[in-house]
Image (tube, coloured by chain):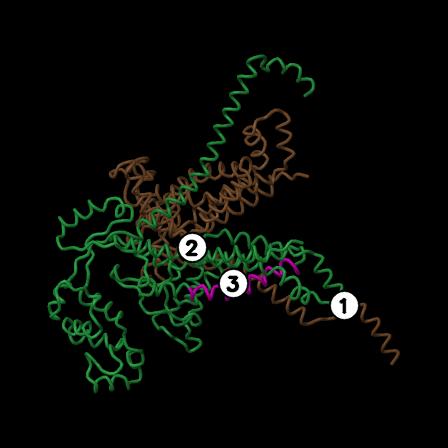
Chain colours: A green, B brown
Amino acid sequence: MSVAAPERTAGFPEGEEIDRQIETRKRQGAIARSLFLLSLIVAVLALLTLLVTVINQSFGLVATVDEVSTAEIMESLGAATDAQLDELDKDQLVAVLMGHLERNPGRRLEREQRFYEDRLVFETQAKWDEVCSTAAPPPGCSRPARSRSDVLALVIEEVVKPQIVGIWNLGDSLFQRPQIEAEVNQAVPGAELSFRSWVSGRFLTSPQDPEPATAGIRTAILGSLWVLAITILFAFPVGVAAAIYLEEYAADNWVNRLLGTNISNLAGVPSIIYGMLGLAIFVRTLQAFTSGAAFGAGADASANGRTILAAGLTLGLLVLPVVIISSREAIRAVPQSLRRAGLALGATRWQTIRAHVLPNALPGILTGTILAMARAFGETAPLVVVGASTFITADPTGPFSKFTVLPIQIYQWTARPQPEFRNIAAAAILVLLVLLLTLNAAAIVLRNRFKRTY
Amino acid sequence: MTQAADSRLGATLTKRARPLEALVQGLLFLAGAISVVTTVGIVYELGKEALLFFRDPAVDFSEFVTGTQWRPGAGQFGIWPLVLATLITSAVAMAVALPVGLASAIYLSEYATSRTRGILKPVLEVLAGIPTVVYGYFALTFMTPLLRSIFGVGAVEIFNDASAGIVIGILSIPLVSSLAEDALSAVPGSLREGAYALGSTKLETAVRVVVPAALSGISAAFVIAISRAIGETMVVAIAAGAGPKNFTLGEDSLFGYILNPFKAGETMTGHIVRISGGDLSYNSIDYNSLFAIGLTLFVITFALNLFSQRIVRRFREVYE
C-alpha cells in the first residue's frame, strides 16, 4: 500500500475539479437521501390507502325500495298516510304484523320471543301450553316479551322488507350526492336514498345470514373468542414453561441447542402448514377427543372433529414459538443478582424462579403473549384448512362446537362476487382492526406500566 | 445421638435429593420438547400422506416433478403450474419489498432523527400487525382495479398474480426493514467515523461501509422475506386466481401467458386453501395431493430458513 500510494496521487483531481466533484457527491447524497425517505413514505402511504379503502367501503349511500311502503301500512291502519312508522305505538305495530304476516311465520316469531307477557297474538293458549311443556320448549316460553323497538325492527324486517338496489362508497356519497340522486330517480323511481353505516350495533349482534343487508358477525366474534381462549390456555403455560426450561435449566448440550434451533425454525414455517398438521392430528387422529365423543359431550355430531378445540390447539401450536421466544427474552432480562440472592438464602432453584424470576419477567411475558394472541386472532389460512364451517348461524356453545371466526367470515364475504358482500367484508375488517388495535394497545400499556430498569 | 449429628453434618455437604425439583424440571423439559414433537409431527404427517399420494397408481413421481398440468379430475398431477404461480407472486413481491425495505432501513438507521424514528417505526409495526386476510381484501378491491386502470382491462385479469404479488410485497416491507435495520444499527459507529474522517459523504458511508459491513444480516433478512412470501396464503387465495394456470411448453407463449403476471394463476398455498375449504373426503387422492404440495412448500421454506441462519453464522462480522 505505502509503495503504491505516491503513484495514485497522480489520479486525484486538483483545483476547481475538486469543488465540482464535491458538488456532485453532495448532490448524489441529497438525491439518495430523498429516495430513502420516499421508500418509507411509500410504506406509510400503503397503510393509509389500505385504511381509506376499508373505510370507504364501510359507509355510504344506499338506495332501497320497500316491498310494502309506509303509506300502505298507514292506510291499512286507517292512520294519516304521511305518518311515520316511528310514531306508531306497540299495539299498532303488532297489528301491522298481524295484518301482513301469514299465521305460520307469525307463530315462529312468537315462539322465538312473545309479543306480550300476558297474552298471545298468533298462537292459541292451548297450543302454547302444549309447546312449552315439551322437553325442549322454544325460547319464547322463558324469554321476556319483545319491547316496542324490537317490534318496530321486526316490522321493518318482515313487512317493509327494504331491498337494496344501489350502493355507493363513502367518497362518492360525500362528493357526488347530487349525481347519485339524479341517477337513482331516473333508474328506480320511488327508491329511497339513505346514508348507511355497514358497521352497526345490529351488524355486531346478528348471526350470519345469506342476505348481506341483514347478515352480522355475532357468530364469528363468539367463535374467535372461544378459539382464542383455547389458544391461550394451551400456548401460555406450555410456552412459558418451555422458556423457563431453556433459560434457567438447560445446560449447553446438543439436545438443548437442538431445541433452541428448532423453535426458531418453527417460527418460520408457513401458517398453512400448521393448518395441515392440525387437520391431520387434531381433526382426524384425535377426533374422539376434539369432537368431545371421548368425554361423552358430543355437542355437535356433525362437527367430526372440526371443532373449536381443534382450531384452538392448532393456533396454539402456531403461536407457541412466538410465546417461547418472547418469554425467553423477558426471563433473560431479569438480572442474575436476583437469582444469586435467592439461591444464597437457601432457596431451591424452582423456589427462586417462582418467587423472583417469574414475577419480574411477567410483564414482558404477558406483552409477548398478547402480541402472539393478536397474531392468532388474525390468522385465517390454518383455520380454513382445519375446517371452519362455511355457514353457521348458531352461537358456539363450548369447545366441541362447530365454529367460524372473524377473519374467515371476512375471507368468505370477500370471495363472493356480489358487491354488497364487499361492504360487509369491509365492515367486518373495521371491527377486526379495532379489536386488534385494542390488543396491541393493551400490550403497549403493559410494557410501559411495568417497565423496570435495573 | 452425637454420631447421628456428625453424619448429618456430613450429609449437608452433599447434594440432597429433591424429587419435587426434579419433577418440575422434567415437566418444563416436556414443554420444551413439544416444539420438537411439532416438527416431527409436521414431517411425519406431511410425509405419510404425501407417500400415500405418490404410491397411488394414478400418480407418477416424475410427472409430479416435471408436469405442467395440474388437473386432479383428469388424473394429471404436475406441480409446475402451482410452483410457477408461487414463484411469480414471490418475485413480484420481492421486487417491491427488498428495495423499499432496505432503503427504509437505511433511512431509519443512518439518516432519521430519533423523533422521526419514533413516528415512523410504529407505522411500520402497525403495517406488520394487520392480518393477511385484510391485505387480500386490499389486493382485490384496490390493487387490481388500480392495475386494470393503468394497464387496461383487457390486459389484466380480475384475478392476477401481479396484484397479489405487489400486496405481499407491501406486507413484507416491515419485515425486511426491521430485520435490515437491526443489522445496520449493529455496525459499530467507529466504522462510520472512520469513513467520515477519510472524507466520505453520508451516502458513501452508508452504501460503501455500513451496508457491506451488515451484509450478512441484510441477506438473512432477504431470505426470510422470500420464505415468508412463498408461504403467504390469504392474499393469493383471494386475489391470485381460483384455478391452476396449466400450460404446455412450446405451445403457450412464454411471456404472454406462462410468465405473464397479469394472468390468473393459483399458487401452492392458494390451492391448498381452496381445496381444503370445500367438502373434502379423507383418503381421497385430492386430500393426499394437498399434503404432497404442503410437503413441497415445507421443504422449500424450511431450507430457506436454515439457509438464512447459515448466512448469519457464516458471514457475520464480529466487531469488538
Element at label 1:
loop
Give the residues drawn in magenta, as a range: A225-249
The residue beneath circle 3 is A235
**C-alpha separation, residue under disc 3 versus residue under disc 1:** 34 Å
Q: Which mark is residue A272?
A: 2
Q: What residue appears at the point 19 percent right and 54 percent down from the top-left corner?
A: A165
Q: Nearer the viewer, mark 2 or mark 3?
A: 3
Disc 1 marks which amino acid? Answer: Lys
Mark 1, other Cα within 10 Å: few <14 / some 14–19 / many ≥20: few
The residue beneath circle 1 is B15
Q: Is residue B216 magenta?
A: no
Q: Which mark is residue A295?
A: none
**C-alpha separation, residue under disc 1 versus residue under disc 2:** 49 Å
Report how many numbered discs are placed on residues in the image: 3
Disc 2 marks which amino acid? Answer: Ile
Which of the two labelled residues, at mark 2 and mark 3, occupies the earlier sequence position? Answer: 3
* Residue A127 in view in this figure: yes
Disc 3 marks which amino acid? Answer: Ala
Q: Nearer the viewer, residue B139 or B303?
A: B139
